[in-house]
Structures are given as structure tokens and as C-alpha cells.
Image (cartoon, rainbow, N blue to C red):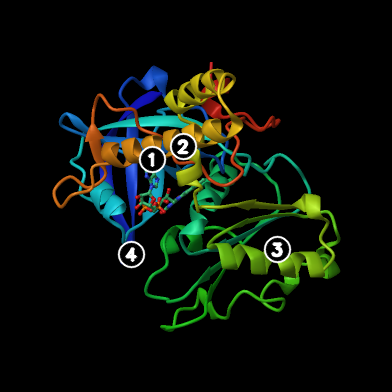
Amino acid sequence: MKKYKLKSISRLSPSSFELVMEPVDIKNGLDFYPGQYISLSVRNGSKKSTFRCFSISSAPSNDGEIRVGVRSGSRYTKLLEQAELNSLVEIDGPFGEFTPDLEEKRPLILIAGGIGVTPMISILESLQVYKLNRPTQLFYFNKSSDDIPYLEKIKGFNKSRIFVSGSFKEDNSLEVGELCQESLSEALPEKLGSSADYYICGPAGFMKKATDILRNSGVPEANIITESFSSTSKNQSVFSSLSFATYILAGFLIAGSITAFAAKDFVKNLLKENDSRESENEVIDNTNNYYTDESSTNTHQQPSGSQSTQRSSTYQSPRSTAS
Ligand SMILES: Cc1cc2nc3c(=O)[nH]c(=O)nc-3n(C[C@H](O)[C@H](O)[C@H](O)COP(=O)(O)OP(=O)(O)OC[C@H]3O[C@@H](n4cnc5c(N)ncnc54)[C@H](O)[C@@H]3O)c2cc1C
């Protein structure tokens, strides 16, 4: 677990904001690959928030600074938005394999919907900062031209196309359009050949649609990589809990001497007990939403099918290569 502190909070769009965090000890910052995510918890006095995952939206840097872009709107994200500057932030990770090799020469196509653009920002910024030449194009889809996270930054990236499907205000850098075969046409195998890699991140329906378009256009399955922001937190919080595993083991030892029916009842009761313990840990009242006592064990949110292994890539984070 790395210790960071909250350096600043700034607005990205009406419904999103960015947290900038710096390591408490500069020598102990996080090494990560562009596109990876972290799990974080913010401290407020003697309480700390539950953990949530956020894709890193900055390039690896020597000072260890990390940015995350957050879609506001829930009680949890409000807690982050209202956190006091210099609050301690505990960071676990990095996680994930949404990490294209930026030294490859084959085309890289990034397809993002809404706040799903955060890992793409890290990837695009890394290409720029470290002068890597992988040919890359971003296709970015939003509902309203008034609410586009990272709009100004994206305008600065070469070859980005930003589509708006709903409310549209005239802007030369924006196009009216939605995710469909036509809007992606210049990135499909007919134009690009079959060697491009496609990285997709956005709401579940958006990712399914993008994947379907790519498959139907003949993109090989192995070249389609997705990142899901929806968690299987309920399952994870039950099955990844160490204390729960201990209970299960004990349950099976006892179950050896009782009937199969009784054993089934026993495990069922343990499951219930663990569930209620977790809801006690996650304090949800009007004043302290999502804060837990410091002493409690926070369970980490993980995305569906997530892995905590780092992708082996020839591209190294500058923090790990810096002498
Ligand atoms: C890999 C990954 C990357 C992500 N990147 C971003 C990003 O860059 N930007 C962004 O805005 N969002 C991102 N998210 C989504 C983010 O983690 C939150 O899910 C989102 O902010 C909504 O949080 P929430 O608490 O409102 O709801 P959810 O996380 O959807 O939780 C819904 C409910 O489940 C329960 N719950 C959830 N987790 C736990 C837990 N650990 N213990 C107990 N109960 C729990 C709570 O009661 C909660 O109300 C990412 C998610 C993943 C998995």
C-alpha cells in the first residue's frame, strides 16, 4: 500500500473532476504502465473511505504524481470531491492489463465513452511526454458538448475525433455522431488492415456495441481489449475477504463430522454473517457516508475478471528506469 496526499481537486466538466495526488515520500511513488488503475481510499481524521478503483489518467512521472478523473454523482464520489487538501490517500495497485505496448509500430485505436476516457488520457499523454511513435487515434463519444471530460487536453492530441450524440454546441473540434460503423470507419480493417489493436473503455452497453462493430468488421478477437468500470464488489468483498476464507475452512472441518445438509446450512449462515459485517464496516449515514473506522478492514472493489498482475511490456515506467 502506497501513501499519497491529496494535492488538488479540479473540475474537468460539469459532471466530472480530477484528483491530483503526490507521494508522501517521493522515493516511494507508484510505478505503473499507462492504462492501469489503482484502488484508493481517502482518510478524513481517524476515518477512512472504502476503497474504489480509478484508472490513472496521467503519464508516469519522476515525481510520482498520480491523477485520476472521476465521474461525480454518487455519495461516494461526493466524498472524494469534498475531501480536504493534504488528506492522506492510501493507494493499492497498480492493476490491470489495459496497457498497450507504446513502442509497437502497429496502429493503436482507442475508443472511449464518457469518463471511460481516463485510461486513454494516460496512454495519449505518455506517447506525447516520452515521444513514443506508435500511430494512435482516439475516438471519443459523449452525449453533450457541454459535458466532455478532458476536452481541452484531448484537443491537443493529434488525430483525436470527438463525437457528440445529443445536445450540441458549435465547436470545430467536435462532430455530431454516435458510436456506429460509420463513425469508426477509418479505423476498421477495410482501411487499416487487420493488425491494429483496439482498446475500448466506457459504459457496459457502449463497450458491447463497440466490440460488436469491431467483430463484425473482421477485427480478430485477440486485438480487442476492454476495460470495465463496473465492479463485482459484492462478490469480491465476500470471496476476497481473508476472514471469510478462514471461516469457510473452519466450516468445512466441522462439516466433515456432520451431515451434508447441516454443512450446507452452516456455510449459508456464514455467508450471511460476513455480508452483515461488511455493511457494518461501510458506514452509510448522512454525515459519514462510505467512511469506516481506521481499524476496520476495508475490502477492495475489483472489476469483473480483473487481475492484479502487471502486463509484461517492453515499455517501462520512467520511475522504474530512471537512474
Ligand atoms: C477498473 C476500474 C476502473 C475505474 N476507473 C474509474 C475512473 O477512472 N473514473 C471513474 O469515475 N470511475 C471509475 N471506476 C468506477 C469507480 O470505481 C466507482 O465504481 C464509481 O465511482 C461509483 O462508485 P459508487 O460507490 O458510487 O458505486 P459502486 O462502486 O458502483 O457501488 C455500488 C454500491 O455497492 C456497494 N459497494 C461497492 N463497493 C463496495 C465495497 N468495497 N464494500 C462494500 N460495499 C461496496 C456500495 O453500497 C455502493 O453503494 C472504475 C472502476 C473500475 C472497476
Q: Disc 4 marks which amino acid?
A: Ser
Label 1 and label 2: CA atoms lie apart by 7 Å
Could you tell me how many numbered marks the image carries? Answer: 4
The residue where tag 4 is placed is 15
* Marked residue nearer the N-terminal end (4 or 3): 4
* Marked residue nearer the N-terminal end (1 or 2): 2
**Tag nearer the camera, 1 or 3:** 1
Residue 144 in the image: state x and y as whole percent: 43, 77
* Marked residue nearer the N-terminal end (2 or 4): 4
Q: Find out if the beta carbon at label 2 lies less than 8 Å from the nearest ligand 1 atom.
A: no
The residue where tag 1 is placed is 275
Residue 15 in the image: state x and y as whole percent: 33, 64
What residue is shown at x 33% (from left), y 40% (from top)? 276
Marks 4/1 in contact by CB < 8 Å: the verdict is no
Q: Disc 3 marks which amino acid?
A: Thr
Marks 1/2 in contact by CB < 8 Å: the verdict is yes
Marks 1/3 in contact by CB < 8 Å: the verdict is no
User: Which corner quadrant of the image does residue 34 belong to?
Assistant: top right
What residue is shown at x 73% (from left), y 67% (from top)? 212
Label 2 and label 4: CA atoms lie apart by 31 Å
